[in-house]
Image (tube, helix red, strand yellow):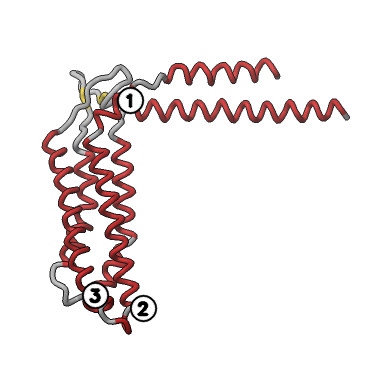
Amino acid sequence: MAENQNTASGGNKAVKSTFGAGLKEWARKKTVAIKRKPQSIALVFMAIVTIYNLLVLTVYSEAIIMYAKDVEWVGLMVFANTLLSILVLVAYLNTFPKLKSKNNKVVVTMTESGIKLNINVIMLVVTVLMIVVMIACECVYYNLMNANYIEQYVNKPDQAGSEAAKLIANSLTYSIVHIVLLAIGFILILTLPLYRKLIMKIDTSKMLESSTESMQSLDLQD
C-alpha cells in the first residue's frame, strides 16, 4: 500500500516537473519571438482594438439609423473609423519591413544580438496619423451624439429610460472605451524603443538552462 502511494506521489511529481519544464520552454520561445519582433506587441494590441471596434459597430449603426439620423456627420465619423481601423493594421505591418541579405534570403527584422529595427518612417507616420484621425473621429461622434442625447432624452424625463436613450448611452460608452484603447495603442507604438530595450535585457539562456535542468532531474528520477 505504501509502495503504491510512493509510486503515485512520484508520478505526480514527474507530471508536475514535465509540465513545469514545458511551460518554461514555451515562455522562453515566446520571449525570444518578442525579442526578435517587439513591434508585434503593438500590432496584437491594435488588432484587438480593431476587433473591438467591429464588434460594437452594430450599436453605432442602430443608434444612428434609428434615433439619430438627423444628426450631421456622425455617420461619416463611424464610416471613417471603421475604414481606418482596418487600414491602420496594413500600414503598421508595412512600417517594419523584413531585412534582406545580399543573396536575397529573408532575414528576421531583429535578432537577439540587438540589430536596429528596419523602420519605414513614412508608413510609421501614416500609422500614427491614422490613429490620431480615429481618435478625432470618435471625439466628434461623442460630442455630437452626446449633445443629441442631452437634448432629446436627458432634458425630457419621460424619455430618459427609453430604449433609444439606452442605445445611444451605450454607444457613447463604447466611444469612450475606443478612444482610451486607441490612446494606449498610440503610446505603445511611440514608446517601442523604450520597452524594446527592457525586453532585450531578458536573458533567455538562463530560462533554457532552467528548463534543461528540470528535464534532467526528471530523467534521473525515472
Question: Which quadrant of the figure contains the N terminus?
Answer: top right
In the image, is residue 60 above or below residue 95?
Answer: below
Q: Amino acid at mark 3?
A: Ile
Residue that label 1 marks? 198
Q: Amino acid at mark 2?
A: Gly
Residue that label 2 marks? 161
Residue that label 3 marks? 65
Residue drawn at (78%, 27%), measured in percent from left and top? 7
Question: Which quadrant of the figure contains the C terminus?
Answer: top right
Can you give x and y, in whole percent of width and height, for residue 204 in the image?
Answer: 42, 20
From the image, state whether disc 1 or disc 2 is nearer to you.
2
Q: Secondary structure at mark 1?
A: helix
Mark 1, Cα crowd under 10 Å, few <14 / some 14-19 / many 20+, is few
In the image, is residue 43 above or below residue 215?
Answer: below
Residue in front for this viewpoint, 39 or 222: 39
**Mark toward the start of the polypeptide (1 vs 2):** 2
Question: Which corner quadrant of the image does residue 81 belong to?
Answer: bottom left
Query: For this view, does 7 lie left or right of residue 59?
Result: right
Q: Secondary structure at mark 3?
A: helix
Residue drawn at (19%, 64%), measured in percent from left and top? 143
Q: Give the CA separation, mark 3 to mark 2.
A: 19 Å
Can you give x and y, in whole percent of width and height, for residue 59 in the image?
Answer: 31, 67
Question: Which corner quadrant of the image does residue 82 belong to?
Answer: bottom left
Q: Give the CA separation, mark 1 to mark 3.
A: 48 Å
Q: Amino acid at mark 1?
A: Leu
